[in-house]
Amino acid sequence: MDSGVSHDPFHKVSKSQSSYTQILVRFVAFLLRDKGDYPLLLPPDVDALIEAFAQTPPPSQLPPPLFENGGNLYCIRLVEILTKIWTRTWEPTLGNFMTDPTMCFVTLSCIRRDYGWAEPTQVTPLLARMIYNMRTIFLFDLHFYDTGPVDVRERYMMSEGWHCQGRPSTFDTLYSLQHLASSIAYQTPSLPAFTWYNDQRTEFVWHGAKITLSMFREMGQELMQLTYEAFFDKVFLGIDWSVSGYLADDLSNTSPGYSFVTDGRNSKYYDRTAFMREIMETPHLREEFVIAVTPQGTPLLNLARARTWLNDYSNALGWLMTNTEVEGGSPSRGTELTCIQLLNTPYRTRGLYAIGPCIAIFCQYSKTSANMGRDTLIPHVLDAFSQEIIKIVAFKAHPFAQQLIKILYPNKPNLLSLWRTNLFVKYDRLFDTDDISSTLRMVSLKSLETPLGIRDYRQMSIFIRRMHCPTLESMFALSEDDNKAALQAGHSMATEERVYGVSSGYLGRLPENLIEPYVKASTEWQVLMRVPEGGKQVTLTDFTDKVAWARYISPDKSPYLRNPTPEPPIVQYGTKPTPTSVYSSLSKLSSRPSNQEASLTTTELASSVQPLVQPPSPLNVNSNPHDKHPVEKDSHVTETNAGKVMVR
């Protein structure tokens, strides 16, 4: 039996806490609030703890309790309630077969608004988050206790049976239900939400709505237009910024503080005071950002204007992040994109790299990180439009934002660190998945007439990519074919890619021979979306000129768009034959070998006798209904089983 004990580190869900904490908040509210006619009978000791917690005033902030200050009474009492509920067995009673309040909460949460039961695929996230919350509460209880530091091993032995599988407990019940729900979800057949509408793969149906590939492209172009307006109208302030040329980047350098922005070889692009200097040297901008000058000649910043610019810059970064999601190849998860770091830190490597002429984002958070205890790098090459804007962001705009943060919030070093470290910042915090989803819904509703959140967009774009951009699939197939050579060396292909032949291009267990196919996968998607592919040098001001911008767009590479299915030939009946056409038709027949019977394909015969055919009579019942050019019964032509026609 699975003991439930893992030797991997317990991974912190640092960028998607809200989806986990919301479940716990709802459960606590379920315990505290009046439930009307719904009976929830709890033991007296649990009721007493809930009553004491309800009378405890919450603090203005909830920092983690520390041993030095004795912990936080509000948090301690909350943990006492949860551990008291989760460290006891709940036996059914006469008339009440479900006495466990946790199971009551889970059951009620599975009822939809239309009073139907939620599908298994909708139940598994709830169970997974409840299990994760239980593990965090038990971990909290081990290290933070209301009487101060205690022996951790002793407390672990006391609670070990309540947070592992195999012993009757709330944790074990939830774990078993999660396995059951996952099994049902995988085995339950369901019809797809996506179906292709035509053979050219340019039209499809999504949840009953008919959408075309051109509409999907319009969504990406609309998103690019909004990103352009956000930066050029409110962030760049009319200044002609440009970062063009080779960017040096040591991909193997994991030193804290390093990135291609801080690389000394790129010092000609990196000037922390460039943005502020341009403002001071431009009269109308200086009038906006400076309200006075001290007798010593020091300008006094207009704090309100500085906050407005920071807010506009944060909104523009949100548009850029969503544009990166749509145009950067196969879509990322929201939690993978929002936590991209601009430079290395002592705890995490950066997510922004310069690979040759391309700028690439390496998503460092994956769905399985909580199980593996480590991150996985997933490369996405940016399109040329986003590439040029991110260069300006990294070298010019971000340093200016850090200057403003230092002036506006001198007593918040964490806020300054947030802007110095991360690429996408929403003023005083990081973006989350809901921010991307809300932006996508707004743009997709206009272009597709169907609102798409990030989850729906991932599904739709992957369906489209499989047909039109099969690079990743062919790359994985190539790895399978190469397994024989790896086995000849005495190890598997996975071992070879992880250990052997690794050079400086090796990024987080990704060998350099696989980086190029990822780059190609991104650029193929960008060509399909009709945007300039990554690696091209574009002039951002050309974006407003359709003719100039069209020169950056490459022709379609999709096999369906490059070689569309030809239309069936149209037979023009009743055309009067000319002597030349008759002679040509008879010559084609007479040029066959002089055997007793000369064979022709159906297509050849149809093209030969077409000018001689009069308006067709009603189709004979003995003719082939699938033949686009049926032969009349009284013709001197018969069809054999081999698909040939014999002329007598």
Image (spheres, helix red, strand yellow):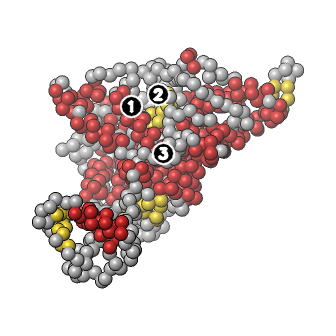
Residue flagged by tag 1: what amino acid is it? Ile
Residue placed under numbered mark 3 in the picture? 555
Q: Is residue 126 above or below residue 353?
A: below
Q: Is residue 374 above or below residue 626?
A: above
Marked residue nearer the N-terminal end (3 or 2): 2
Residue placed under numbered mark 1 in the picture? 515
Contact (CB < 8 A) between labels 2 and 1? yes
Q: Is residue 240 left or right of residue 208?
A: right
In the image shown, does 63 or 347 lie closer to the viewer?
Answer: 347
Q: Which class describes the residues within 10 Å of circle 1: few (<14), some (14-19), or many (20+)?
A: some
How far apart, in angstroms, are the residues tagged by discs 1 and 3?
A: 24 Å
Residue at 25%, 31% in the rendered image: 494
Give percent across and percent down for residue 194: 39, 60
Q: Is residue 449 left or right of residue 365?
A: right
Q: Which mark is residue 387?
A: none
Residue placed under numbered mark 2 in the picture? 355
Residue flagged by tag 2: what amino acid is it? Ile
* Res 154 seen here: no
Residue at 49%, 25% in the rendered image: 344
